[in-house]
Amino acid sequence: MSIQKIARLAGVSVATVSRVLNNSDTVKDKNREKVLQAIKESNYQPNLLARQLRTARSSMILVMVSDISNPFCAEVVKGIEEQAEKSGYRILLCNSGSDIERSRSSLQLLSGKIVDGIITMDAFSKLPELTRLIGKTPWVQCAEYANAGDVSCVGINDSDASQQMVRHLINRGRRKIALINHDLNYKYAQLRQQGYLSELERSQLSWQAIGYASELSFSAGKKNMLQLLAGEERPDAVFAVSDTLAAGAMAAIRDAGLRVPEDIAVAGFDGSGLAEMVSPPLTTIAQPSRDIGRKACELVVQRIENPEAVTERIIMDWHLIERAST
């Protein structure tokens, strides 16, 4: 609702509404009460409206997450929210599922000036369409980045991390290492597969097997592991591109009467709390998930407050955590 509609509802002038929102002491008590009652009936917060009137900003950031049920995504969002509050902003969360229609619906908030900036975790393949929809609105791509263009990005070196995990498995004596990957529309899935294949080639190991999960879930990991077990040759290690996929793989291995890691070693990716909860505890690549979120929020706030801020591509540190699953 606009300030003009509030004025009509209260039966006062636009100038009077503006003075009330700015806490001016020149407004008659009767008129002030009318304006505040109109705002209350309209379910609008006067402080937010006042800020928009003074600065043409809402102090809201739209966060479009590919899968909020993924523990990694949830931790990133926590980091975004923590930093947003420190910077005087609030977030609106959209679980887009990297579906362009759902993204388009959420991005309608731009036309109403409801949000000042956007942080996305959508698939790399969707970036051209998102670029067209978002236009010049301050935007940061989080944990899923572009190689070029005008979009600031925050993530890790997925290829190097994946390569080191495969090297770890090889150093533990594994020679038939399978990969449970996700949708290759995601850049991180492409890069983690690239790291997997590069390390096998470097180590002169010809055996490989790759499964593609439809989603980053326990059930998808279990399903892919069952398919790998049904193959002609059983792997002696499995590297999954998320901890949730790895947890599902471990369940499938147990259901088949096999042991982790004695028969098949299992490794994951993300460093989520789940990795410590499963039995045996999961070897994983730990990403600085909350720091990724905080940095992405810092960058989008910089763009909001200084539209001429340079595009940045931030690559953050990661580390391998070895546990009993390998």
Image (spheres, helix red, strand yellow):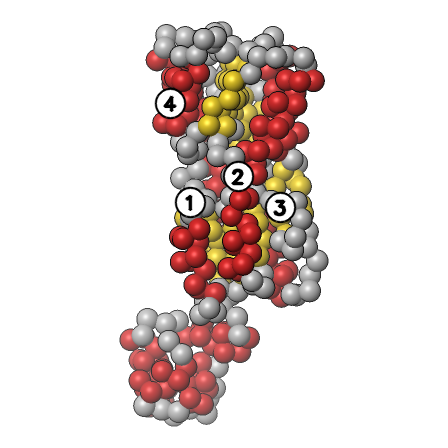
Local crowd at mark 1 within 10 Å, few (<14), some, or many (≥20)? some
Above or below: residue 202 compared with residue 116:
above
> Which element type, helix, strand or loop, lies under badge 1?
loop
Residue 97 tag number: 1
Q: Position of residue 324 (x, y in %)?
A: 52, 15
Residue bearing the label numbered 2: 186
Upstream in the sequence, badge 1 or badge 3? 1
Upstream in the sequence, badge 4 or badge 3? 3
Residue bearing the label numbered 4: 223
Which residue is depicted at the point 66% across and 45% down?
A: 147
Which residue is depicted at the point 46% across and 27% down?
A: 212
Q: Pick the quarter of the image with the C terminus.
A: top right
Above or below: residue 315 compared with residue 276:
below
Above or below: residue 318 compared with residue 198:
below
Q: Position of residue 274 (x, y in %)?
A: 45, 29
Above or below: residue 240 compared with residue 27:
above
Are dots 1 and 3 in contact, CB under 8 Å? no
Residue type indicated by callout 2: Tyr
* Any part of residue 130 in sight: yes
Upstream in the sequence, badge 2 or badge 1? 1
Are dots 4 and 1 in contact, CB under 8 Å? no
- Please tell me which residue lies in front, 322 or 109: 109
Q: Position of residue 54 (x, y in %)?
A: 53, 78
Q: CA distance from mark 2 to mark 4?
A: 20 Å
Q: CA distance from mark 4 to mark 3?
A: 31 Å
> Which element type, helix, strand or loop, lies under badge 4?
helix
Residue type indicated by callout 4: Lys
Are dots 2 and 4 in contact, CB under 8 Å? no
Local crowd at mark 3 within 10 Å, few (<14), some, or many (≥20)? some
